[in-house]
Image (tube, rainbow, N blue to C red):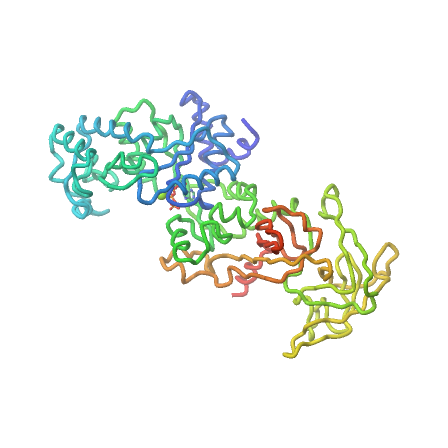
Amino acid sequence: MSESATAQSGNFIRQIIEQDLAEGKNGRSVVTRFPPEPNGYLHIGHAKSICLNFGIAQDYQGHCNLRFDDTNPEKESQEFIDGIQQDIRWMGFEWSNPKFASDYFEQLYQYAVQLIKSGNAFVCSLGPDDIRQQRGTLTEPGVESLYRNRSVEENLDLFQRMREGEFKEGEHVLRAKIDMTSANINLRDPVLYRIKYATHPRTQNQWCIYPLYDYTHCISDALEGVTHSLCTLEFEDHRPLYDWVLDALETPHHPQQIEFARLALEYTVTSKRKLNLLVEAGHVESWDDPRMPTLSGMRRRGIPPEAIRDFCERIGITKKDAFIEMTVLENCIRETLDPQAMRVMCVLRPLKVVIENYPDGKEEIFSASNHPKNADTGKRAIPFSNTIYIEQDDFMEAPPDKYFRLAPGKEVRLRYGYNITCTGVVKDEAGRVAELRCNYDPESRGPGRRKKKVKGIIHWVSAKHAIDTEVRLYDRLFRIPNPGASEDLAASINPNSLEVMHHCKLEPSAQNLAEGDHVQFERQGYFCLDRKPASGMRPVFNRIVTLRDSWGKLEGKK
Ligand code: ATP
Ligand code: MG
């Protein structure tokens, strides 16, 4: 067993698997599956299931099937089938051949015929409303359909004619014959097949009857030799039906369904349907908008897949639904990026500073580590001249006590450079601070430098050498921890989830970054290069995450 399997054997599913292996069950093999419906792009919730299913297969020398659960043709598409595969690969997992529930349509049909023959299924000709009404409630038993006792011959005939397209949608369905008085509503003669005239992304118009999830899933698992079918808690009440179908069919193999808690993350939604609403209504640009909790959005945002895998490991697998704080994910991202991301300085809201006592036209090159904790990453060259940009926030004309940055008459240190003292403020016609005048202290840098107590250290970029960039500051998409509780998602969208800074000034050592590369803008956060710019265009950087949690502070203040 690999190290990570040992490390994680605390999770209850791994304990079950280890016990099964010890008892020699399933010929000591482990087969799992990840079964997305191709009706949208994958999100962070799916990542939990992916890491669990593929992770278990890796750690117990088994395999994990990727199986598309494609039984709702109207909502599914090839675009989603392709996107889902790209996202799982990006997460770092592989599979042999993708499988599709639709590959089993013929087998599923033959199994249904078998259920009819053994008296376990019947064609019901009630309309959908009647079926719903007769199902009963949690406190009242259901009512048996008046078609329940059709003969096997009649059922076989009708089912075949359903397949052949003789009937309209909703005219007949195939139902299991179980128990209308069961305390578990899922066992009250559930529908197994419905008529639907829709073009399927793979089988096109070959079928006009489609099997339902509960019927399809257990048989697909059995046909693939899945040993442990891991699903989320809402399927716990469906497990008796899962087992009933496989028992009724006497399939040679009977997988074990085990349920675990869904991932719910604060300040976002983890439901393809709700994410689709955001895309459709234009609240975000696309499925891969960097604010989306989709894997494609997180990739575009610059979040490394290792950080997501680490997050999934940290939250663990339990049987209890709970919201995970966004800071847990954000901390995983910071911890993954900190050792990897090279440091550069970037001024997001530039304020020009002219250093009057530094000779015009003179240039110096300062040297700084690419990474303060990793000498192997080498050094970068930082040019300095008499005109630099600093952050508007790093200057205050009338500062309060204990303001350690720049103010008239005050001195700060330029990171890697000299100390400067503000000697004058130039204002525009509207009275706003437009430029600063400063003097530098030539003795304040270098090996023999004069030691001085200067508390503030600020970042800066030489005006002449700066790369003009656009920086997109992304923040949480929602203002409240549980936006999914209301259908009106738009009402809780964070109006400041995207701020575009058009005139940022970036240190020139960043000029050779490739698309998707990560950097730390010192004092600001982690950023990634969105796209390599076309020639003549400014590069665009996405903020992945700030250096520290600022939401915690805000919440504390409430
Ligand atoms: P959605 O409501 O977003 O469509 P789903 O469960 O219907 O979610 P599927 O495509 O059917 O989406 O899911 C594929 C697999 O991923 C299932 O096994 C499902 O249980 C799992 N999964 C989906 N969402 C989560 C989540 N939030 N946490 C953990 N597992 C999840
Ligand atoms: Mg679903």
Residue 67 position by quadrant: top left
Residue 470 position by quadrant: bottom right
Badge count: 0
Camera sees residue 547: no
Image location (x, y in percent) of residue 108: 27, 30
Image location (x, y in percent) of residue 197: 24, 41
Front-most of residues 377 and 238: 377
Image location (x, y in percent) of residue 522: 68, 55
For ligand 1, which image quadrant applies? top left
Q: Which part of the image, by quadrant, shows the N terminus?
A: top right
Front-most of residues 387 and 245: 387
Q: Give me the residue at 88% from left, 56% from top.
A: 448
Is residue 294 toward the left or the right of residue 205 in the image?
right
Front-most of residues 3 and 410: 410
Q: Is residue 65 above or below residue 348?
A: above
Is residue 186 toward the left or the right of residue 382 in the image?
left
Image location (x, y in percent) of residue 130: 16, 46
Q: Give me the residue at 43% from left, 56% from top.
A: 482
Looking at the image, which residue sits at the far right?
A: 448
Residue 398 position by quadrant: bottom right
Camera sees residue 293: yes
Is residue 504 toward the left or the right of residue 286 in the image?
right
